[in-house]
Amino acid sequence: MAKRKKNPDALFSTKADAIAAKDFLLRHLAEFPYVNGQVSTLGGEHRAAVMLTVSLDPKDSWKNGILQNSRYGQFSVDYTGAVEHFSGYGLGNMRKSKAKSVTDAGRKLREFLHKTRKENPRGRGKASKRYVVDQEQKGLWYQIGRFAFKARAIDYAHAVADRSGKRTRVQHTFPAAHNHKPL
């Protein structure tokens, strides 16, 4: 059997090189609350890939202790230098890119994760971001959350009824859990 030629453009050509690259990437991303890495040799030892899992939330804040309930991403860095984000939640999309070195791959991952953390410091993606509306500028509009759209509509109806003197026409109750009292 012919011996395989080493690829001169490869970031790592053996499993040992891939393990060293994984250790470097784990140290490079250590500032994030949860980082895990493994080496995959499904294509053979000469085609190894480093698989990384990074979460922006601490492990104790994961709902039911499940990684998928946090802002996390799974990344692969293969022997050719392709850096890919193939799974995750609450991080947005990272374009597949080509790294010239393991240091460059770590830099790209770190920049993406820092940008994501800055854009979305606490929430989980676009669905649960909280928007704050300037109360003085918008009058009855206030900090909104999950059930606030209905509350804003009712508050507006109450304000209109108060101005016209017909408050008895607007009747609505809210659960006490939302600090709203029946009229």
Image (cartoon, helix red, strand yellow):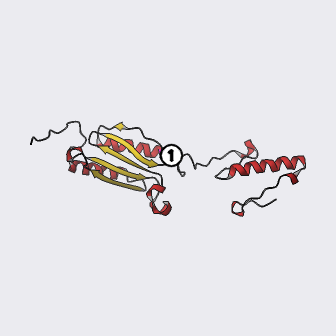
Q: Residue at x 45, y 46 (%)?
A: 114
Which residue, given by chain and number where applicable, does mark 1 sit on?
Answer: 118
**First to last magenta residue range:** 116-120
Q: Is residue 2 shown above or below 158? A: above
- Name the spot of residue 134 as percent of width and height, x first: 69, 44
Query: Where's residue 76, x and y in %?
Result: 34, 46
Q: Nearer the viewer, residue 138 or 79?
A: 79
Q: Residues within 10 Å of mark 1 (few under 14, many from 20)?
A: few
Please state if 167 lies on the left or on the right of 130 as rendered: right
Is residue 55 within the magenta segment?
A: no
* Residue 23 visible in the displayed image: no
Residue in the image at 38% along x and 38% along y: 96
Residue lying farthest to the right in this orientation: 165
Quarter the N terminus occupies: top left
Q: Amino acid at mark 1?
A: Lys
What residue appears at the point 14 percent right and 40 percent down from the top-left corner? Answer: 4
